[in-house]
Image: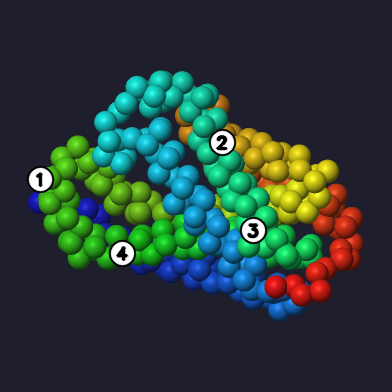
Amino acid sequence: MYEFTKIGTMQFVLWMTGTVLFLGIPVLIAILWTVKKKEKFTSVLTGAVTFLLFALILEKPIQNVLIFPTAMGLPNHGIAQFINARPVLWAFLVGFFPGLFEETGRFVAFKTVLKNRKNRETSISYGIGHGGFEVMLILGLTYINYITYGFMINTGAYAETIEQIAEVMPDQVNAYLAIPDQLAAFTFGTLVISIYERVFAVLFHIGASVLVFYACRDKKKFWLYPLAILLHTAMDAAAGLVVADVIELSDWGLEAVCTVSGLAVFFGAYFLLYKKDGQAPEMADNT
């Protein structure tokens, strides 16, 4: 019978706080923005649905089959072995897939569902939906999982689950055995890093949405679309290089990179495109 250290009350408080923040704040920001700017809330929803479709339904399975086949229960084929044996290539592809699919998702959305919405505020509405839904899905649901695991560990249900896993998937046991120690080590600083990182990630998504919006609205600015892919790839690839141990950075060092990237893309798009555009002419019927 497996035995694990009990999860403390403080961890549960932090996870519950994180759940409320990561699920509630994105919705609150979306409501405040759309009400203040008299924007259609469907622009926000389009950003959320497009992220779900292009990032999770399309991108992740393709990326996993190509780079992480064993995570999907598939044989470790030659392409995956080639990529995983080359950390720099691995980091580039880990960054390129989100860059290509998410920015293409924005492009498709602005060219189809949102094609009649010419007001500049739509670009930010979409970005709030895209970035906000990512926060809710990735961190909000993750913290709910933490709470669930915590209760299972403290009641002994987790140990029973491990025994069942050991019978059917013995090669996966070590990964599950590491989870209780990771959860027990969760601190206020861990929560702060998560919040900090998401703030600048959302700013990046809003900035990238502005770039692609103008790429769709003006043929002469089409180059902003591949630029958005390049910027997105660069930011995620930098994190990939750290994970692959190609470069050494502390957690806060990596957050500094994300901070600079998020601020540069957001303010660059805001001042050079959004603000400069001024009161852009809108369609008579902004539907």
Q: Closer to the camera: disc 3 or disc 4?
A: 3
Nearer to us: label 2 or label 4? 2
Q: Earlier in the sequence, mark 3 or mark 4?
A: 3
Q: Residues within 10 Å of mark 1 (few under 14, many from 20)?
A: few
Compared with residue 34, is residue 221 higher up or lower down, i.e. above or below? Answer: above
Inter-mark Cα distance, 2 to 4: 33 Å
The Cα–Cα distance between marks 3 and 4, rounded to whole angstroms, is: 40 Å
243, 181: nearer the viewer: 243
Res. 96 mark? 2
User: Tag 4's secondary structure?
Assistant: helix
Q: Which amino acid type corresponds to the residue marked 3 in the rendered image?
A: Thr
Task: Tell me if 11 is positioned left or right of 210 in this view.
Answer: left
Residue pointed to by mark 4: 148
- Discs 1, 4 touching: Cβ within 8 Å: no
Question: Which badge, 2 or 3, is on the more N-terminal residue?
Answer: 2
Question: From this viewpoint, is residue 263 visible?
Answer: no
Judged by depth in the image, the label closer to the viewer, 1 or 4, is 1
**Badge 1 element:** helix
Say which quadrant the C terminus sits in. bottom right
The circle drawn on residue 167 is 1
Residue to which mark 3 is pinned: 112
Residue 195 picture location, percent across and down: 56, 58
Classed neighbour count for the residue bearing mark 4: other residues with Cα under 10 Å, few (<14), some (14–19), many (≥20): few
Q: Percent position (x, y) of residue 123?
A: 72, 60
Rounded to the nearest angstrom, the CA distance separating label 1 from label 4 is: 22 Å
